[in-house]
Image (cartoon, rainbow, N blue to C red):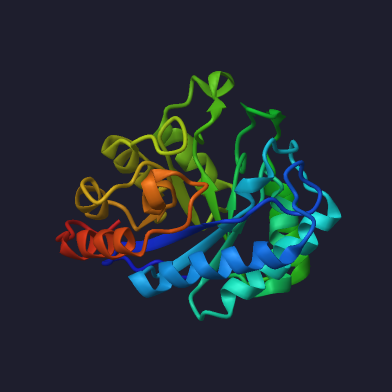
Amino acid sequence: MRLAPDRCALIGMVHLLPLPGSPGWGGSMGPVLEAARRDARALVDGGCDALLVENMGDLPFLRGRVEPETVAAAALCVSAVADLGRPVGVQLLAAANREALGVAVAAGASFVRVEAFAYAHVADEGWLDACAGDLLRARRALRADVQVWADVKKKHAAHAVTADLDLAEAARGAAFCGADALIVTGARTGAVTALADVEAAREAGLPVLVGSGVTAEDAPALARVASGLIVGTWLKEAGDWRRPVDPGKVRALRQAVDAASRGASP
């Protein structure tokens, strides 16, 4: 997916139900695929430019990997979502970035969201090493036309080990390591992303997306400075990521983004 310099993209999250290999797995792929298609269709019908499929239901997450059965199930889900004709991305938690790349290649996705791309950090699951070197070599070997959207000082993580790097410098590090786009977030799921952080990340010269806390109220301001908004929680019924997508909220957010007059190009 190529992010336009003069238009903010709206990327809707498809939060998958628990997949095989996770504690919450229900024993059948039928309901998982049905829920993924339902939410994806609501996001597309509401005007999302792209979709990001994530195994959010697999918590608690493994550290830096997922099981083979999870990879297989995720590929089925991503393929089903891709059939709707919008660009699709993949994120496999936690930081199972190599597996996400494999799913993207097999299922026809165009980007992966990557944790711990350029710098290591401590997440809920423990220590996560940076993966840029291995991941980009794998992409090259697979001849994969899949973009890497790298989180910078990601939510749900402690970054004390890189406390001497401000967000702008961390963004430059991710750009130096070969990211195609950068993602900035608040401190946790649903937490507001600061406009100042988006501006700081833009200093690296790459497209910058907002990865948490977007609502119809703050979307116009964010859309003026960001290349894309990745939205999940706010688009769900009652603002609960476990619930289905609310089509009315998707339409409202699309209108809010379109109403924003863009300033300088990212």
Q: Quadrant of the C terminus?
A: bottom left
Where does the image place residue 218, in percent across and percent down from the top left?
Answer: 23, 45
Where does the image place residue 80, in percent across and percent down from the top left?
Answer: 63, 74
* Closer to us: 30 or 92: 30
Taking the image as shown, residue 115 lies to the left or right of residue 39, namely right
Let me know if residue 135 appears in the view: yes
* Closer to us: 119 or 211: 211
State the image quarter where residue 72 is shown. bottom right
Q: Residue at x 58, y 65 (%)?
A: 36
Q: Residue at x 58, y 72 (%)?
A: 81
Let me know if residue 102 appears in the view: no
Taking the image as shown, residue 214 lies to the left or right of residue 97, namely left
* Closer to us: 248 or 142: 248
Taking the image as shown, residue 220 lies to the left or right of residue 105, namely left
- The residue at the far right in this view is 68
Where does the image place residue 131, in percent across and percent down from the top left?
Answer: 69, 44
Taking the image as shown, residue 256 lies to the left or right of residue 214, namely left
Where does the image place residue 30, in percent across and percent down from the top left?
Answer: 71, 67
Callout count: 0
* Closer to us: 87 or 37: 37
Q: Residue at x 81, y 48 (%)?
A: 21
